[in-house]
Amino acid sequence: MMRPRIVAALLPLLALAACAGGPAGSSPSATPTASDAGFTPVTVDDCGTTVTVEQPPQRVVTIKSTSTEMMLALGLGDRLVGTAFADGPVPDAWADAAADVPVLSDKVPGQEALLEVEPDFVYAGWESNFSADGAGDRATLAGLGIQTYVSPAACKEKGYMPDPLTFDEVFGEIREVASFFGVQDRAEALVAEQQAQLDAVQKPAEPTTALWYSSGTDTPYVGAGIGSPQMVMDAAGLTNVFADVHDTWTSVSWEKVVEADPDVLVLVDATWNTAADKITMLESNPATRELTAVREHRYVTVPFPASEAGVRSASAVTSVAEQVAALGS
């Protein structure tokens, strides 16, 4: 079971400083708003690290697409002073808001690059983004007056790792991030919109098995039974052929894939390993070209940024279900 998350109101502040606790000499990227003035401080237990937000962050750096897109979906692009480690392009709906945000690095930014933009808050998609040889460990950044937050869906510690991940957890993150900025109304609107998307999904009329193929050639890396792939496939009405593996993703042999012979292949489309490249490999490899889904070209694609839990998860379900329906029976 996942450890319950803690969200607590602290004593109201007497005044709101112009800069939300950033390093000395920093200046905010956005003017504090009226909602900032009525802000209620928040404390959360994030992957085992206590995060206390006493004022809405003004200078935010995001690492990974999931965190960047969460900020944009909540209308908080004006708080971003840098992004890093994008897994793909930002969807068109948020492209304008992201256009002028500096990109600090194609991968995890080093601590020097991070500190140059004087953030007061760093929001990461993976726990591993915070390390001594990366952006800096969380304790060190806290000592510099920089709060840190990791997507709860990515927590790996026992008692914090979602088991299994559900849309309740995804929606909880939307609400939690919104609470840091005093925009809970935006979170509720976004959650309602995404729940409506999920409620409208048309699942296959007949049982349909699927393999979520993320990466790898000699050894495929696939969606297992408790992470984002399982959550999306469940909601789309697909039966994951590796649902019995108690992990988020896992490595398997092609022999096991052939033995499972799924009805549908969900292919993650990444710039470094495209869906087209996967199809070429599947159709040329003697071990896979006789799979039913390969022979019948029963392919479904998911952009890599939508393969990890976040604000694109609901739309990923809709897309997968629609693509499966288009394949026919």
Image: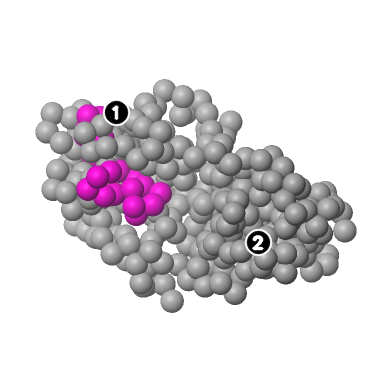
Q: Residue at x 66, y 40 (%)?
A: 277
- What residue span does the magenta drawing correspond to? 114-134
Which labelled disc corresponds to residue 254? Answer: 2
Total residue callouts: 2
**Res 66 visible:** yes
Q: How is the image coloured?
A: one colour
**How far across and down, in percent of the image, does residue 218 sit?**
59, 54
Q: Residue at x 63, y 54 (%)?
A: 213
The extreme bottom residue here reads: 1
Q: Disc 1 residue type?
A: Ser
Q: Tell which of 283 and 160 is nearer to you.
A: 283
**How far across and down, in percent of the image, does residue 95 sit?**
52, 29
Q: Tell which of 262 and 324 is nearer to you.
A: 262
In the figure, is residue 53 to the left or right of 203? Answer: left
In the figure, is residue 124 to the left or right of 165? Answer: left
In the figure, is residue 292 to the left or right of 7? Answer: right
Which secondary structure lies at badge 2?
A: helix
Residue at mark 1: 29
**The N terminus: image quadrant:** bottom left
